[in-house]
Image: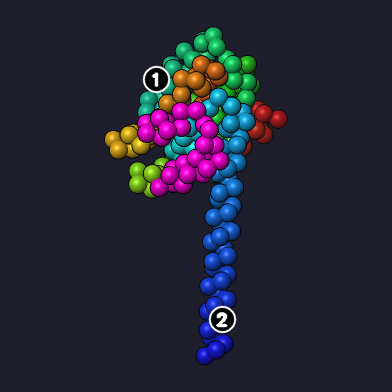
Amino acid sequence: MLKSIVRISIIIIFLFAEVNTWASEREQQIRKFVEDELKYHPEARLIDLYKNYFQDAYGPGHLIQDATRAGAYLDWELQQPCWTDQLLWQALGANHDYYRVNLLLLKNGTIPRDTLLAGMIKSAGLARKPDLETWKKEWNEVLQLIKQTRPDLPNLKSDERLIAKAFSEGNVVMHHSKQYETTYCPHYRIIHRSVFERWQKQYLK
């Protein structure tokens, strides 16, 4: 009897340690995601951190409803005059399931146009796309860590309310902040890690 109790106690302690280790690793991943985004884009606001994390979960699906229109918009975007952001690619979120690929790589001929469009379509079907309630819970975990580590983030409270309002309306898609848009003139597409890794071997050596 005593041996059984000891064995059960050891198992419980082991499982508790495993859970704590997972939680600690998860927290470190989230903190790293926040640090990286603010390192690359120091003018980013909470809403931009949200968009980064969102894109890693939902991919580019909301942008690929019509492949012909997506191609036409891509051609229009390549003609825009402002190309401030020189970061050529960026791993997203805490899981790095998706990457932002700067359209400079298309503009300078590194990645062919048709390859990019095909990669976008392929990437759209690979997102995990959590349901709203799961997403709200996941984002709240991230939000609490952001508020702990970056309480001085500009527009923190107003952006938090804006995101909460979107959730209450059943919406999860947000746009970049005006500050981010003005400072960085972002031009990128969201590509799944598996596609990006193939491109690294073929185009980004």
Instruction: Kindly identify which numbered label has been placed on residue 106.
Output: none
Nearer to us in this view, 96 or 15: 15
Name which residue lies at 62% across and 25% down: 87
Q: Which residues are magenta?
A: 137-162
Q: Which of the two discs, 1 and 2, labels the residue nearer the N terminus? A: 2
Q: Which residue is mark 2?
A: 7
Q: Which residue is mark 1?
A: 69
Left or right, residue 130 beside residue 89: left
Q: Position of residue 140 (x, y in %)?
A: 43, 44
Left or right, residue 3 beside residue 51: right
Name which residue lies at 57% across and 87% down: 3
| Classed neighbour count for the residue bearing mark 2: other residues with Cα under 10 Å, few (<14), some (14–19), many (≥20) | few
Q: Amino acid at mark 1?
A: Arg
Q: Of tags 1 and 2, which is closer to the observer?
A: 2
Residue 23 to residue 87: above or below: below
Q: Is residue 113 visible?
A: no
Res 158 quadrant in image: top left
Res 85 quadrant in image: top right
| Contact check, label 1 and label 2, Cβ < 8 Å | no
